[in-house]
């Protein structure tokens, strides 16, 4: 009777779920995604697509005039001059926000024109029909506004009249920084102005990328310095606003602003010297005004310039 030898037990090897090769490829893919998102964020911020400028249908009745002039650093800028309806009592330069053009400000140009103000709307560099290849999100745009004031104040219609400025978002921050340099800007109004560019970049990064924004934004800032060779901390309306007094400042801000938190408005107000006014719109957002709040907003805007220009 033959005996059978038992077969040795088969060794079962556990599967490798984290193979070193796959882990390395994952790290590489994550790094490429991180770098790609950061580079895209930096590039679009500094090279925004140009939105076409369309002539309004009522251009002739407005007396709208196409104008060109130079920024303080030589960039050719394009804009519209709208003469006041009736006898002029002053002039206002209107400054659009980042990623937009002069058309953003056309509603308020009409409003101020009816109230007796000459108005100048223009496109910042790398926007609308203006020259320039890079948007610096407020840094060199101050030169654009100062060039606009040079042109506006020299027009024969403006002789003997004071100049004010009204800006949205980036345009508001630029208005505050330019007014700190040029005392010809006799009154300043902003809506949704950011306190510093650094805050604005960090906030936008969080909105775009969620929790990943804290990782992507610092790299985006470093990449952006390829085109804007300064620290975002240097673009600071917060540092400039205290130098505007005794000229008056009116700050508008939407309570529900997700782009530039209302805290920026409170910080700007705290840094400003009298005369200063802060008007927070309880139902409005970033340069968007709730319809029920618009009539009071328009009244406050017009009355501010009538009082101080």
Image (cartoon, rainbow, N blue to C red):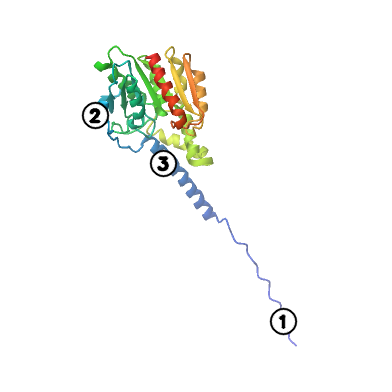
- For residue 224, what is the image quadrant? top left
Asked if one can make out residue 119 in the rendered structure from this viewpoint, the answer is yes
> How many residues crowd mark 3 within 10 Å: few (<14), some (14–19), many (20+)?
some
The residue that disc 3 covers is 40
Q: Earlier in the sequence, mark 1 or mark 2?
A: 1
Cα–Cα span, label 3 and label 2 = 41 Å
The residue that disc 2 covers is 60
Residue depth check, mark 1 versus mark 2: number of the one nearer the observer? 2
Secondary structure of the residue carrying tag 2 is: helix
Where is residue 178? Give x, y as percent.
38, 20
> How many residues crowd mark 1 within 10 Å: few (<14), some (14–19), many (20+)?
few
Residue depth check, mark 3 versus mark 1: number of the one nearer the observer? 3
Q: Quadrant of the N terminus?
A: bottom right
Q: Is residue 2 left or right of residue 304?
A: right
- For residue 60, what is the image quadrant? top left
Q: Which of marks 3 and 2 is nearer the N terminus?
A: 3
The residue that disc 1 covers is 4
Secondary structure of the residue carrying tag 1 is: loop
Cα–Cα span, label 1 and label 2 = 108 Å
Mark 1 touching mark 2, by CB under 8 A? Answer: no
Cα–Cα span, label 3 and label 1 = 71 Å
Q: Quadrant of the C terminus?
A: top left
Q: Is residue 20 left or right of residue 229?
A: right
Secondary structure of the residue carrying tag 3 is: helix
Residue depth check, mark 3 versus mark 2: number of the one nearer the observer? 2
Q: Which of marks 3 and 1 is nearer the N terminus?
A: 1
Q: Residue at x 33, y 26 (%)?
A: 110
Where is residue 139? Give x, y as percent.
39, 26
Task: Establish if 195 lies above or below 247.
Answer: below
């Amino acid at each position: 009777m033959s005996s059978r030898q038992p077969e040795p037990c088969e060794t079962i090897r556990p599967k490798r779920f984290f193979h070193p090769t796959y882990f390395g490829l994952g790290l590489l893919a994550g790094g490429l995604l991180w770098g790609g998102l950061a580079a895209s964020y930096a590039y679009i911020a500094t090279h925004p697509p140009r939105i076409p400028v369309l002539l309004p249908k009522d251009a002739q009745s407005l007396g709208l005039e196409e104008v060109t002039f130079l920024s303080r650093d030589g960039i050719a800028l394009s804009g519209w001059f709208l003469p006041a309806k009736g006898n002029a009592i002053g002039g206002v330069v209107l400054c659009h926000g980042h990623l937009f053009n002069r058309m953003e400000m056309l509603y308020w140009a009409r409003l101020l024109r009816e109230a007796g103000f000459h108005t100048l709307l223009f496109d910042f560099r790398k926007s609308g029909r203006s020259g320039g290849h890079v948007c610096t999100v407020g840094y060199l745009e101050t030169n654009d506004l100062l060039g606009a004031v040079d042109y506006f104040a020299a027009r024969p219609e403006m002789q003997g009249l004071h100049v004010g400025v009204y800006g949205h978002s980036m345009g508001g921050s630029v208005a505050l920084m330019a007014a700190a340099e040029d005392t010809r800007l006799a009154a300043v109004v902003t809506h949704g102005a950011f306190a510093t560019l650094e805050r604005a970049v960090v906030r936008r990064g969080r909105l775009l990328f969620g929790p990943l924004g804290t990782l992507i934004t610092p790299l985006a800032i470093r990449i952006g310095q390829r085109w804007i060779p300064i620290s975002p901390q240097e673009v600071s309306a917060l540092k400039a606003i205290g130098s505007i007094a005794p000229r008056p400042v009116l700050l508008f801000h939407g309570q529900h602003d997700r782009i530039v938190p209302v805290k920026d408005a409170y910080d700007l107000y705290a840094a400003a010297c009298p005369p200063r006014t802060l008007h927070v719109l309880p139902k409005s957002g970033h340069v968007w005004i709730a319809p029920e709040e618009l009539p009071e907003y328009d009244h406050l805007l017009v009355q501010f310039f009538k009082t101080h220009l």
